[in-house]
Every structure is written in C-alpha cells, then in structure tokens.
Image (spheres, grey):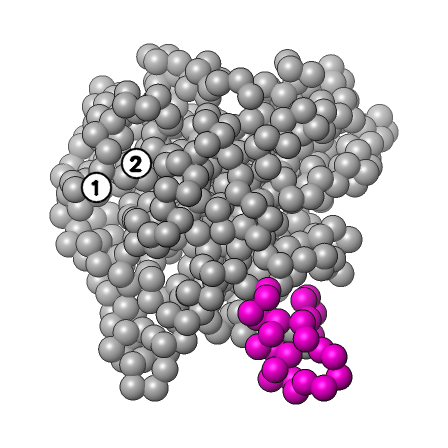
Amino acid sequence: MTDIIRLTAAEIAGKIASGELTAVEVTEAHLARIDAVDEKVHAFLYVDREGALAQARAVDDKRARGEKLGPLAGVPLALKDIFTTEGVPTTVGSRMLEGWIPPYDATLTKRLKAAGVVILGKTNMDEFAMGSSTENSAYGPTGNPWDLTRVPGGSGGGSSAALASFQAPLAIGTDTGGSIRQPAAVTGTVGVKPTYGAVSRYGMVAFSSSLDQGGPCARTVLDAALLHEVIAGHDPMDSTSIDEPVPPVVEAARNGSVAGMRVGVVRQFRGEGYQAGVLQRFDEAVELMKELGAEIVELDCPSFDLALSAYYLIAPSECSSNLARFDGLRYGLRSGDNGSRSAEEVTSLTREEGFGPEVKRRIMLGTYALSSGYYDAYYGSAQKVRTLIKRDFDKAFEQVDVIVSPTTPTTAFPIGERADDPMAMYLADLCTIPANLAGNAAMSLPCGLAPEDNLPVGLQIIAPVMKDDRLYKAGAAVEAAFVQKWGHPLLEEAPSL
C-alpha cells in the first residue's frame, strides 16, 4: 500500500495501462490510507467508498475488453465539496446544505467520470469557499499534514491536505482569490488556477461569479497538467466559458524550459509582512531560473497595492447576490417553519442558523457596498481598480513572458491564530488576488522549506490569459532543477502522520 500511495498520478496511470496494477488495487490502497490517517487530518467530508470501487471496477473492465482509456483512467482523486455530484452529498462546507444530495453532475464532475478518474469523495473547505485556512468549515478545521496544529490553507484546505497526506494523488480545488494556490503553497503541493473561463463553472456552487475558477491540484507539475487537460475546455452550459482550444499544457510540462524566457519580478510582491524565510526561498528560486537561462526583469505594478481592497469589495458584493438563493424555501436547510411564521421569518431564521460568521460578514459587507448611495463609492470604485490591475498586467506582459512571486507572504500559521482577526487572515491572499481580478492563469509549486519553521514555501508563476502552457513549461523546469539540486520537499522531508 505504501508504495502505491507514494506514486505520482502519471506513474499510477502507466502501471494500470500496462496491467502491473488494477484500478481496484490502487483505489483500495488509497481508501486504506484514508482509513488510517484522515481521522487526524480531516481532509474529507464524505468518502464515497462504494462509488469509488465501482468506478475502479469499470476502468478494469474496459481495460480487460481492450477499450481505449484516458491518460488518467483509474487514478484516484479528491473532489472539493463545491462541485455537484449526482447521488453524493454536496455541502460546500456549510450547514445550509447539510445532507443535500444533488440530482445532477457538474460539468467538471462529468468530465472526470468520462476520463475514468476515480472520485474518492468530497473534501473539506471554508464555508462557501470564504476563507484562507479551512477553519470556517461548519464541520471543523482540517490539519496541515506537515504540522497538524497548523492550517492547510483555504478555502481548499481539504484538497491540499489530501494530497500532502498521500490520501489521493490528485485533487480539484477552486480559486476565487487564491484558494487553490495558497493551500498548495503551505502544504508543499502544486496548484493551478487556469485562465478564468477555461474550466466550466456549471455545477460549481457560486461564491463570486466573476472570480471563481476550478482547477487542478497535484504533487507534481506533470500530474497537474494531465488533470488540467481532462477538466478544461468549452462548455455551452457556462456563459463565461471560453470557446477556444485548451493550451498544450501536457506537452509544456513534458518539455519544461525557461531558457530564453523573460521572467518578471514585481516590486509590489515583497516588503513589510513577508516572512524572511519565504523571501529567501523565493530569491533562490529566481536565481535558479536565471541559472537555467531565464532573463529576469524588474517590474513596477503600482495598482497591485490596491488589489486586496478591491477584491474585498467585489467578492462580497457578488457573494451577497449569489447567496440570496439560500432562503430556506427551495432546498437545503429550513428552520422555524412551524406553520405560524411568515416566509420572511423562516428565511431569517434559516440564514441565522445555516450561515457561519465569515459568510454573514461578507454578505453584510457586500450588501452595504451595493446599497443605494454607496454603489459608486465602493463597488464601482473597486471595479475601476480592477481595470487598472488588468492594465498593469497587460503592460507587464509586453515586457515578460511570465511573472513570479512568493505565493503567500508566510508559511502555514497555527490553527486559531488569526480566527479573531479577519484582516490578518485576508492578508494570506496578498500575492494571489491580482491574478483573479485580471483573469490570468497562475500556478503555485514548492520551492523549499522556510529555515525558521521547516514548513513549505510556494513559488507563484503567473501567465497571460489563455497562455496556461507557459505556467507548465516554466513550472516543470523549476521543479526538475529544484529536485535535482535540493530534492522534493514533500516526498523526502514531509513528516509521517
């Protein structure tokens, strides 16, 4: 079992295709790992044991019949509990949808099943994807496998923790302001936010519709590319879906190189609030790219300093609109409906019980920002800043091919340390938010351990819209050089649970 769970997704797929392993054997090994460690980690909210084994048997049957299989057929995956999955609970980490079983699959879920990917279950997350630590889950926090007293990032901490604890070789996350990349950074894994519109949002429970984006999570750049290729592509069910071919991400990951690439380093992505060890590892990664033949270009993007403020007006405003549908009358939780109360009273009681403190905070902030007399001063101004950020990116990409930065200002912080300080919590997304506001593609990959605490540090790579392949080309080159020089932090230095 130990040997199987330590394999990469690409290695597992190869062994299943060759007949060296069966999909059932691989699935059983990962289910056994979940049984062994997830009580401590709490990466999963629901484990679909019977469904996963049935999917694995179907892959084995197809292989026995000689049918053509996808490149990830039989590989297990942990799915963030924000994508609808027919017949399987989807809670979005909230009491509001506790026990809700969707009657349909999200487009992303359908594509995973069609590719023969085995969905092990649904992972823990901050309620409605609102948070940077997975502490806002109504079902309790997830621990970081490197140190169970620390956060695994958020909102997709369950997915990142499942990877880092070897409960799954692949996972799916969503990224509204950094919720794929930030968890990847603090757990020593790889997370990619594809170009906005590159992966369908149909069947993904909405938080902030102009920012939300599903994407791949893995332990290697190639594994992330293989998963990216499965889930991306145009979807007529999603009006924001881009009708263009998927960039050649797998080819880029297999042929990683930064030779001749112009790499931008943004002045605004360092300074006060950044942990010394994070900056040290980032600077080493930049020097490594230079050694590999990249040209390093200093960039000034002044509007990035306003990104955090703009994001925390735009995202709550869209959240207040999207979450209005949870009224206790149509589906999900219903409280206080004793026959004597009005619909308005039932809605109020349902929302009081069903939404947690962070969700209520953002709904109130967003409703205020959209209210009459304040719309132009707050939401309208934030959208203008968003335009400035996009212009800064456009100007930067005239000079460089990709931009790099630390993914997070610090390593994983202790559970509870920032629970009563929302501003300190929001600062965890300082480096990741600009890419969401502009719709760019972005990746986080490991670049070592911070010397102060021996915890993972993430390197962020940002590419222009629909140039996602550049992430994988640069990321694979850095990953290979890093492993050759210092070894893989997760595979060689992660503590056993």
Find out whether residue 333 is within the magenta segment. Answer: yes
Q: Quadrant of the C terminus?
A: top right
- Mark 1 neighbour class, 10 Å CA radius: few under 14, some 14 to 19, many 20 or more: few
Q: Which residues are magenta?
A: 330-354
Label 2: element kind: loop
Query: Label 2 belongs to which residue?
Result: 410
Say above or below: 104 vs 1: below
In this figure, which residue is indicated by the disc labeled 1?
273
Q: Is residue 35 visible?
A: yes
Circle 2 residues within 10 Å: few <14, some 14–19, many ≥20: many
Q: Quadrant of the N terminus?
A: top right
Identify the residue at image location x=24%, y=33%: 275
Q: Are marks 1 and 2 in contact (CB under 8 Å)?
A: yes
Q: Is residue 92 magenta?
A: no
Residue 216: image location, x then y, percent: 52, 41
Element type at mark 1? loop
Q: Earlier in the sequence, mark 1 or mark 2?
A: 1
Q: Quadrant of residue 348?
A: bottom right
